[in-house]
Amino acid sequence: MRQPAAIRYWLVLPAAGGGSRFGGSLPKQYAPLAGSTVIEHALAPFQDDGRCKGIAVVLSPGDQWFAKLPVAKSAGLRMVGGGEERSDSVRMGLASLPTADPDWVLVHDAARPCVSRDEVDALLAGAMNDPVGGVLAVQVSDTLKVADEDGRVGATAPRRAMWRALTPQMFRAGLLRDALARAAQGGQVPTDESQAVEWLGHFPRLVPGSARNIKVTQAADLALAEAVLKLQGAMQ
């Protein structure tokens, strides 16, 4: 895919989570994966991208792993202390970057190691002219059931309208700062950046991504992530 020519962006990568569902003493973002670590794979498509103006990696206060990785010495990368919630960490990472309000900011999960450069290109191309921004997402193919209070099927959701949100997500710096600040002030905890923006009455564009852009949540996900990375390497 041809890269959008006139766009530049900043990247915030929240990596302060402990990953309680993953298990073990090592946070999931530092788990070994295909000769590297999960977080290094998550950063890879952005590191050598000339459109990326700088990266804020947001870490837990007691993080003792990231600084030891070779990627920590990359030019344009800064390490930032995170907050209690993911949205707090994104807000802190954004505050650490010298962004102007119109600048584009991408937010990508440290636990998504299989995002491809093609997906980044698609997001930039699909959202760069949108007044709100965009979210990589995959349209749901399974039939979705809505449960009632008794654990029975209460309704069947129209799957043609259902999308599964991925990352990165892309917004103007000013809008994202405002959305996250308003959420924090109101005691609201968005599950992703798009939800915070939606609470302000804005609705991002859905940009089709890849089902291979998986999130590592449990240890068993590492085998799938490794298979995806091998497949992507073979396709290049």
Image (tube, helix red, strand yellow):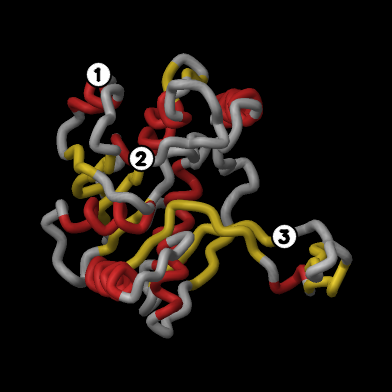
Q: Amino acid at mark 1?
A: Lys
Q: Which mark is residue 134?
A: none
Q: Residue 230's spot in the image, x, y percent? A: 59, 23
Q: Residue 193's spot in the image, x, y percent? A: 41, 63
Q: Residue furthest front?
A: 150
Real-space CA distance between mark 3 and mark 2, rounded to the nearest whole angstrom: 27 Å
Q: Residue at 16% of width from left, 53% of height from top?
A: 97
Q: Which residue is mark 2?
A: 15
Q: Quadrant of residue 154?
A: bottom right
Circle nearer the viewer, 3 or 2: 2
Circle nearer the viewer, 3 or 1: 1
* Secondary structure of the residue carrying numbered label 2: strand
Q: Would you say 200 lies left or right of 10 here?
A: right
Q: Residue 107's spot in the image, x, y percent? A: 36, 53
Q: Residue at 36% of width from left, 70% of height from top?
A: 187
Q: Residue at 70% of width from left, 73% of height from top?
A: 161
Q: Residue furthest bottom?
A: 201
Q: Which residue is mark 1?
A: 68
Real-space CA distance between mark 3 and mark 1, rounded to the nearest whole angstrom: 39 Å
Q: Compared to 18, does 144 lie above or below?
A: below
Q: Amino acid at mark 2?
A: Ala
Q: Compared to 149, does 37 lie above or below?
A: above
* Secondary structure of the residue carrying numbered label 1: helix
Q: Compared to 163, does 48 lie above or below?
A: above
Q: Which residue is mark 3?
A: 140
Who is closer to the viewer here, 28 or 204? 28
